[in-house]
Image (cartoon, grey):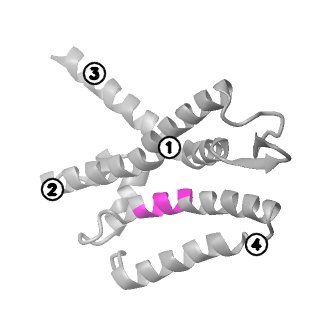
Amino acid sequence: MKKRTAKRIVKKRHHRAVLEIAMFSYMGITKKSLSVLLCRHVGEKKLLYIDLSQTCYDSQHTLAVGLAALALVGLTLGLPASIVLKAHRITKAGQKHEELTTISRVTTLFNADCPWWMAWLMFRRAVIVAAFLYGKIADIEDHSVDWRALPFLVLVVSGLLQVWYMPFKLP
């Protein structure tokens, strides 16, 4: 019986460590995945924004786009969703949040009406990165938009949502 308990503890710590590593690498992987999807016109060719020696939509780029799409769906959308679902499940069961990872414990700062706020904050980070990348490309290609306005707009909308929902617990 003790052997099973030890295996369960190791498995639980392994899962927690993987989740913590995913949290720390979240923005880097999101940024790289989004940048693989962005191409720009140079003459008659479409070249990858981050590496102008790479042609877009050839076999290597198509493989990279597939992997980037998996990373975006799995990490950028899946990680926030899994944290919110796990926090909701533990709260519903009446367990303590100390059993979760550090980031999941942060969800105890939010009102019971807004258990999704942590997911919104993580998704907001990905949207800001996407706005920066898109803005830089739009500024390079046609100078039609000030790329600094896009992330600012995301922050303004996020601030307005925070004022509207008031997701944090008041002391």
Residue 88 placement: quadrant: bottom left
The amino acid type, in three-letter code, at marker 2 is Lys
Tag 2 or tag 1, which sits nearer the N-term?
1
Q: Is residue 124 magenta?
A: yes
Query: Real-space Cα distance between discs 1 and 2?
Result: 29 Å
The secondary structure type at the circle numbered 3 is helix
The secondary structure type at the circle numbered 4 is loop
Nearer to us: label 4 or label 2: 4
Nearer to us: label 4 or label 3: 4
Can residue 21 be seen in the rendering of this structure? no
Nearer to us: label 3 or label 1: 1
Mark 3, other Cα within 10 Å: few <14 / some 14–19 / many ≥20? few
Residue identifier under label 1: 72
Location of residue 128 with respect to 47 vertically, above or below: below
Quick check: marks 4 and 3 in contact, CB under 8 Å? no
Residue at image coords 68%, 29%: 58
The amino acid type, in three-letter code, at marker 1 is Leu
The amino acid type, in three-letter code, at marker 4 is Ser
Residue at image coords 27%, 21%: 6
Q: Is residue 169 left or right of residue 70?
A: left
Residue identifier under label 3: 6
Nearer to us: label 4 or label 1: 4
Residue closer to the observer: 114 or 140: 140
